Image: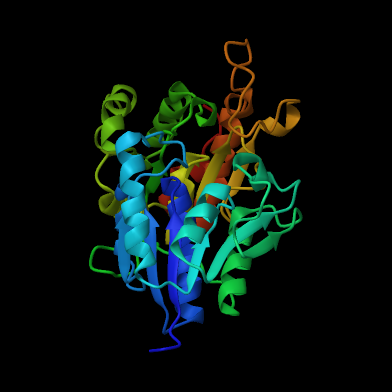
Amino acid sequence: MANQRRVLIIQAHNLGDAVISTTLVETIAHGLPTAQIDVLTRPEIGQIFAHNPSVDAVFTGRFPMGSVHDFGLKEMLTLPRIVGTLRRRGYTDVVNLAGDFREEFLGRLITHHDNWSPAWSADHPCSKVIRRSAIRLANRPIVIPADRPNIYDAAAIMGTAITGAAAEKAALYTPAKKRIIWNPLERAVGIHPMASQPWRRWEMEKWQALAQFLIQREIDVHVFGSPSEAKELNAYFGRLDTSRISIVTGNLSDYFAAVSRMRVLLCPDSFASHVAFALGVPAILLNGANDAAAWPPPGTVVLAAGPELKCYPCYNRPTCFGSSDEYACVRRIKMDSVIEAVWEALKDASDNQHLFPLFQQPLTV
């Protein structure tokens, strides 16, 4: 079709950012039903988009953006070939949700048409974690005001600007391209204790104590992590009651399916919180160094000790290394507060409160 919109979404950052970007996929697919939607992303992230029935093609490569730091000489030489392939596809729109000059530059190389990018206000929290250019490289900048601090607000504003339609919710799919929705087991609580940066992590000993507390109250605890984290997870959780504890370290598709069965998921400020939101799973987020208003998904219960600290938020540039109060923004979150949040979430998520002896027992470890 001559007037068909051909849209490329650039997602060159991390797993959590990829899940957030499915908001754009869903909004564009619903608002522009005849549009072709392609995605450029990292190889390890590709399946998040490839399983989405609204995505036509997924292209992968390595980029200088994100926290993975895997962009060397080989990747630098490969990227121009990827850009050339994408230029030939004739995109009418290239979209990114980062607002970083590097994504904007990629978009400019790929299309001479509409290059969409968020234009963060100077005091917007998301502006603190990107690299800006003195010259705006995107010809379709969309202003994101500081009074809309959450990244999901930005995704909604961007999606509506591109399509003229209402924003849709993030979504994840099975390899069979079926949308995954919340379908909880009766007594299942999920814990995803790991995060890529230490200032996001609550101490493992506390996660272990929390798991033990729940198990003693006849709650089944599912501990999630990546295959590379299996050894550490087994060291902390493998000796707990095997009839009540399950350690899940499979691939992304298995992870999404398993998380969808949880009554509630507990996690740090990480990929896991965005997965829970996309699946409709109630989540409790233990926030660390980032602004608690900026990245937690809508409806997530956020526990944060950072606001009482002068150095908060440091936006992943901590000055507390080696101090007596190292990573206090997350480590000061109290066990009692976490347990109370779990209790409230289980009450809200349970059709039959008598299933949970937790409701009738003291809320202290």
Nearer to us in this view, 351 or 5 = 5
Residue 260 in view (yes/no)? no
Residue pictured at 54% horizontal, 55% vertical? 104
Q: Is 17 on the left or on the right of 318, as rendered? A: left
Residue pictured at 30% horizontal, 27% vertical? 240
Up-down relation of residue 154 to residue 288 (above or below): below
Q: Estimate the x, y position of residue 156 in percent, counting from the top left.
A: 60, 66
Q: Estimate the x, y position of residue 295 in percent, counting from the top left.
A: 59, 48
- Residue 48 sits in which quadrant? bottom left
How many numbered callouts?
Answer: 0
Q: Is 139 on the left or on the right of 256, as rendered? A: right
Residue pictured at 45% horizontal, 87% vertical? 3
Q: Estimate the x, y position of residue 312 in percent, counting from the top left.
A: 70, 30
Say which quadrant the N terminus sits in.
bottom left
Q: How is the image coloured?
A: rainbow
- Residue 291 sits in which quadrant? top right
Nearer to us in this view, 22 or 307 = 22
Up-down relation of residue 206 to residue 181 (above or below): above
Up-down relation of residue 45 to residue 228 (above or below): below
Nearer to us in this view, 224 or 45 = 45
Residue 309 in view (yes/no)? yes
Up-down relation of residue 269 to residue 364 (above or below): below
Residue pictured at 30% horizontal, 46% vertical? 78
Q: Estimate the x, y position of residue 308 in percent, counting from the top left.
A: 74, 29
- Residue 71 sits in which quadrant? top left
